[in-house]
Image (cartoon, rainbow, N blue to C red):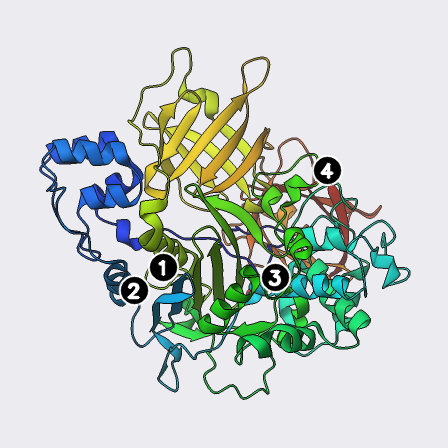
């Protein structure tokens, strides 16, 4: 999951939440392979054969399903019934979703297939709460970034037609485009172009409900300072795929959707897939929902911000159904869409190219052309997800097993503890766990000789996720990411700590002097590293001095508002439509403040008369100057 950051998170992607099936302590310990916790709970009277109140699985069955063989052996020695019949995958899916998803709120459509046969297809919740229309297999959802594989396919079809090459430069299609002579379509496809992500522009959400032409959208990011030189790094950017959709239209003389309709959709019976627009009059269209907040006065759901999908284009504008996405996968993976050489390009991960950026996070290197290539417990997996206000989507393929998993939701927030990603994870596990590789178990350990908890205390820059910090509290090491809550992590090996409840490992690395220099987070197939940095020391400023820094600052269309916190001891900064972040005075620099949730520093510059006229935002090595443009209303 992405956390908040000043530069903005990508809008079309979202990450998994924890699965509510693991709420019972003994079942959680069994699924996570925590041998120490299993022993502890059993010694306190936990029932070794207790069926989970939702899934019906016993702890032993839970351990087996999650590949925790050592935990299963331990439970068997403690009296677990190893002969008990497992509930069927369909039973577990039904129990989990019926228990968690209320029938009168937003929900999910789910489909699982194998060898061209649908094994499971269900709808849970409402496609339209106001009209009281339930989600069915005919319900259409906006699929966000799952669109990217469609756009990439259109690009490869256009290459087969001789209309373009993935080695072509952007300048060929947009003369005068900044750095366009240095960036290629391949770099757009793999997110290595450096083009700034337009959905991360601070004011993007301000007008997202309005229609825009492709030229208007491209103009919004064309001249924004790039993230890096083309080809030198990887950073997810919706701008690249918006350009790709437009380039296909330039070369084909019709939209990429029209091209795909003729070449794929019509042939495969995909009658419920297309570019979303508000005037289509779709018969079974899901409305997007968001949780009510304190301003709404009560809990529940409300309509989400309704994007005009012309602003998403080839990055995320499509709608579809679970059935159509199943048909899409069947066509793609059985070679009915792309030639073999094109399909090889589509599924070649970035890390396998000789000119790939030298420094790649493991997850970044798995990005191909609109698909992510990886593995789930030893099974090859090709997938992509999507998310925008009110919608999330997951489309996964296990090519060696000919298995497709599709999950679509009309909420970007968890529903009863589930997200589209965690439902897809649950579905894959239920239907494939017997073929998946085992996972290691662990016992809570003491610290390695010669180390102490204080070695790991500090702050680590996790870029788009925010700042990860570690502290020692009550004799335990605790971790906290961005503005999340603190949580205990226990030793699981030399320089390794683990948070079993969320299946996360923290692996610390030391420099040549023996000091901890970085930490790598490994969680459910995601691998992200952060380097240690010295966080600025917090200082003090009077209320009057802080008040001099408040105001509204402007850079092109981007607005940064600074106001006093209610207690007057720090500032609250709001960039565009993003939420407020707290900024604290720096002890060693006058007129400087910093954020603890994300690695950002703000510098305020004064004119000769002593008045602040400029705010400079420092982040990721980039300095962005904002000119003072007025005052802010302290009551808002």
**Left or right, residue 19 beside residue 588:** left
Residue 30, horizontal then vertical, whole percent: 24, 40
Which SS class for mark 4?
loop
Inspect this view and state whether residue 630 appears.
no
The earlier-in-sequence mark between 1 and 2 is 2
The earlier-in-sequence mark between 2 and 3 is 2
Please name the residue shown 40% across and 53% down the image. 17
Residue 13, horizontal then vertical, whole percent: 55, 57
| Contact, mark 3 vs mark 1 (Cβ under 8 Å) | no
Instruction: From the image, tell me which residue sits under label 2.
Output: 97
Tag in front: 1 or 2:
2
Among all residues in the image, which is located at the extreme top? 450
Please name the residue shown 75% across and 39% down the image. 355
Q: Is residue 287 above or below residue 563?
A: below
Please name the residue shown 80% across and 57% down the image. 165
Q: How crowded is mark 3: few (under 14 residues within 10 Å), some or many (20 or more)?
A: many
| Contact, mark 1 vs mark 4 (Cβ under 8 Å) | no
> Which is nearer the eye, 529 or 360?
360
The earlier-in-sequence mark between 3 and 1 is 3
Q: Residues within 10 Å of mark 2 (few under 14, many from 20)?
A: many
Instruction: From the image, tell me which residue sits under label 4.
Output: 354
| Contact, mark 1 vs mark 2 (Cβ under 8 Å) | yes
Residue 400, horizontal then vertical, whole percent: 46, 50
Q: How far separated are the C-alphas under marks 4 and 3?
A: 23 Å
Tag in front: 2 or 3:
3
Please name the residue shown 43% across and 80% down the image. 138
Q: In which quarter of the image is the C terminus?
A: bottom right
Q: Residue 418 carries which label?
A: 1
Q: In this view, does 616 lie above or below 91?
A: above
């Amino acid at each position: 999951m992405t956390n908040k950051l000043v530069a903005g998170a990508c809008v079309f992607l979202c990450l998994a939440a924890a699965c509510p099936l693991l709420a019972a302590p003994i079942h959680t310990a069994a699924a996570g392979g925590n041998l120490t916790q299993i022993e502890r709970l059993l010694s306190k009277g936990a029932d070794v054969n207790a069926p989970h109140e939702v899934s019906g699985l016993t702890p032993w069955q839970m351990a087996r399903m999650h590949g925790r063989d050592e935990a299963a052996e331990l439970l068997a020695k403690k009296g677990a019934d190893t002969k008990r019949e497992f509930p069927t995958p369909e039973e577990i899916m039904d129990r989990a979703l019926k228990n968690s998803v209320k029938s009168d709120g937003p929900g999910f459509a789910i489909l699982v297939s194998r060898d061209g046969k649908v094994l499971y297809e269900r709808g849970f919740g409402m496609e339209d709460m106001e009209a009281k229309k339930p989600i069915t297999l005919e319900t259409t959802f906006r699929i966000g970034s799952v669109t990217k594989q469609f756009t990439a396919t259109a690009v490869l079809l256009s290459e087969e037609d001789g209309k373009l090459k993935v080695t072509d430069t952007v300048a060929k299609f947009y003369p005068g485009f900044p750095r366009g002579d240095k960036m290629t379509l391949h770099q757009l496809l793999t997110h290595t172009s450096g083009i700034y992500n337009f959905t991360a522009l601070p004011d993007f959400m301000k007008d997202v409900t309005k229609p825009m032409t492709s030229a208007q959208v491209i103009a919004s990011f064309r001249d924004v300072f790039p993230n890096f030189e083309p080809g030198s790094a990887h950073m997810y950017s919706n701008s690249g795929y918006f350009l790709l959709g437009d380039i296909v239209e330039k070369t084909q003389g019709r939209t990429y959707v029209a091209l795909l309709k003729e070449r794929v959709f019509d042939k495969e019976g995909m009658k419920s897939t297309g570019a979303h627009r508000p005037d289509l009059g779709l018969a079974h269209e899901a409305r997007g929902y968001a949780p009510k907040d304190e301003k709404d006065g009560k809990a529940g759901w409300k309509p989400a911000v309704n994007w005009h999908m012309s602003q998403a284009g080839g990055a995320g504008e499509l709608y579809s159904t679970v059935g159509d996405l199943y048909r899409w996968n069947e066509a793609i993976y059985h070679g009915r869409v792309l030639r073999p050489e094109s399909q090889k390009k589509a599924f070649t991960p970035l890390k396998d190219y000789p000119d790939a950026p030298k420094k790649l996070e493991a997850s970044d290197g798995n990005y191909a052309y609109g698909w992510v290539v990886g593995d789930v417990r030893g099974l090859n997996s090709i997938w992509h997800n999507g998310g925008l206000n009110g919608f999330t989507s997951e489309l996964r393929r296990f090519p060696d097993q000919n298995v497709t998993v599709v999950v679509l939701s009309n909420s970007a927030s968890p529903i009863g503890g589930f997200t589209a990603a965690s439902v897809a994870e649950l579905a894959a596990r239920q239907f494939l766990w017997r073929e998946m590789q085992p996972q290691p178990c662990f016992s809570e350990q003491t610290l390695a000789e010669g180390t102490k908890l204080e070695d790991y205390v500090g702050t680590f820059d996790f870029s788009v996720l925010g700042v990860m910090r570690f502290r020692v509290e009550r004799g335990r090491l605790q971790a906290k990411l961005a503005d999340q809550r603190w949580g205990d992590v226990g030793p699981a090996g030399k320089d390794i700590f683990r948070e079993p409840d969320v299946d996360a490992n923290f692996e610390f690395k030391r420099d040549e002097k023996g000091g901890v220099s970085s930490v790598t987070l490994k969680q459910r197939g995601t691998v992200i590293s952060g380097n240690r940095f010295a966080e600025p020391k917090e200082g003090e400023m009077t209320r009057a001095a802080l008040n001099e820094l408040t105001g509204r600052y402007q850079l092109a269309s981007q607005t940064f508002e600074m106001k006093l916190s209610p207690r007057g001891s720090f500032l609250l900064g709001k960039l565009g439509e993003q939420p407020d972040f707290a900024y604290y005075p720096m002890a060693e620099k006058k007129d400087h403040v910093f954020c603890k949730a994300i690695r950002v520093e703000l510098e305020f510059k004064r004119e000769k008369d002593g008045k602040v006229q400029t705010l400079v935002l420092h982040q990721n090595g980039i300095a962005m100057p904002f000119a003072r443009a007025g005052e802010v209303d302290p009551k808002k």
